[in-house]
């Protein structure tokens, strides 16, 4: 049991971390290449940088669907806060990061990490329940949607129990093995799944904006194909 835990904390963690970084770098580079190719072909190469930045921020706030899906947006927003902050700024994680990459940084106070972890668990369960309840969400859901949210919730539950062993109904080693192996798996899959959108969102907004700009002269070609060349439209 101890050997498995050390394997998960040591070699497997470093492998998962390295593949996560390399895979993420690959995705970022491919996204930038896509932007450059779209810009090269676009007729209008001017980008409203400020407007795109505002639109990106709007996608991050919890009430972008306030009229129809306000509760879902708020739940998703709260889920993502803990999902980003706890793995990076929990003191125990920072010690693990330091052992793997030799770099450290300030940690969140313990009570804040605890509340964020619990918030992530509750909001994650809320997202799962909402997906099960809403027929449209069920129809649009893919395997990744059904896999990652429960997996993340499990990792956060076991992480909280590992930090508070007096509250755990399961032994510390068993809890830690599930927690660390689950976290390793998420890191391994992150660059190859929809989780990467947390990192690529700012880049992808620019690619999409440039990609929808027609190649110079394409408008005239479309009018010619429709037989409306030289006619008012």
Image: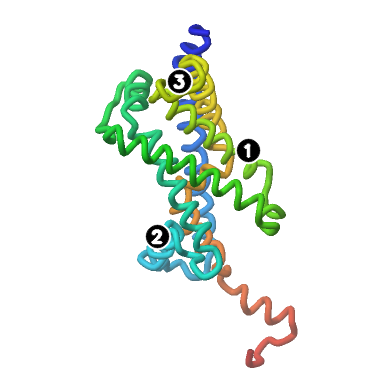
Q: Earlier in the sequence, mark 3 or mark 1?
A: 3
> Quick check: 8 left or right of 103?
right
The image shows residue 181 at horizontal and vertical percentages of: 53, 22
Query: Dot 3 corresponds to which residue?
Result: 14
In front: mark 3 or mark 1?
A: 1
Query: Alpha carbon of mark 3 to alpha carbon of mark 1: how far?
Result: 23 Å
- Whether pointer 2 and pointer 1 mark residues with C-beta atoms closer than 8 Å, the reply is no
The image shows residue 179 at horizontal and vertical percentages of: 50, 25
The answer to which of 14 and 141 lies nearer the viewer is 141
Please tell me how crowded label 2 is: few (under 14), some (14-19), or many (20+) other residues with Cα within 10 Å: few
**Identity of the residue drawn at 69% across and 52% down:** 138
Assign a secondary structure to mark 3.
helix
The answer to which of 173 and 30 lies nearer the viewer is 173
> Quick check: 187 left or right of 100?
right
Query: Dot 2 corresponds to which residue?
Result: 57
> To which quarter of the image does residue 57 belong?
bottom left
**Identity of the residue drawn at 66% across and 57% down:** 134
Q: Earlier in the sequence, mark 2 or mark 3?
A: 3
**Identity of the residue drawn at 43% across and 23% down:** 162
Query: Dot 1 corresponds to which residue?
Result: 147
> To which quarter of the image does residue 227 belong?
bottom right
Query: Alpha carbon of mark 2 to alpha carbon of mark 3: how far?
Result: 33 Å
Q: How many marks?
A: 3
Residue 202, placed above or below residue 4: below
The answer to which of 72 and 168 lies nearer the viewer is 168
């Amino acid at each position: 049991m101890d050997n498995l835990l050390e394997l998960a904390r040591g070699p497997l963690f470093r492998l998962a971390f390295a593949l996560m970084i390399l895979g993420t770098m690959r995705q970022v580079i491919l996204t930038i290449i896509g932007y450059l190719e779209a810009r090269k072909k676009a007729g209008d190469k001017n980008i409203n940088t400020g407007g795109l930045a505002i639109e990106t921020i709007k996608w991050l706030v919890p009430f972008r669907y306030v009229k129809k899906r306000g509760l879902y947006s708020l739940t998703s927003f709260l889920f993502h806060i803990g999902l980003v902050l706890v793995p990076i700024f929990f003191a125990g994680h920072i010690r693990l990061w330091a052992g793997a990459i030799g770099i450290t940084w300030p940690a969140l106070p313990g009570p804040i990490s605890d509340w964020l972890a619990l918030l992530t668990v509750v909001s994650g369960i809320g997202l799962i329940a909402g997906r099960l309840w809403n027929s449209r969400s069920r129809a649009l859901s893919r395997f990744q949607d059904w896999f990652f949210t429960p997996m993340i919730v499990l990792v956060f539950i076991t992480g909280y129990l590992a930090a508070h062993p007096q509250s755990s109904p399961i032994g510390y080693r068993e809890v830690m093995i599930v927690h660390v192996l689950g976290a390793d798996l998420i890191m391994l899959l992150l660059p190859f799944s929809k989780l990467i959108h947390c990192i690529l969102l700012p880049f992808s907004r620019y690619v999409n904006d440039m990609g929808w700009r027609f190649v110079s002269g394409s408008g005239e070609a479309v009018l010619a194909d429709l037989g409306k060349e030289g006619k008012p439209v």
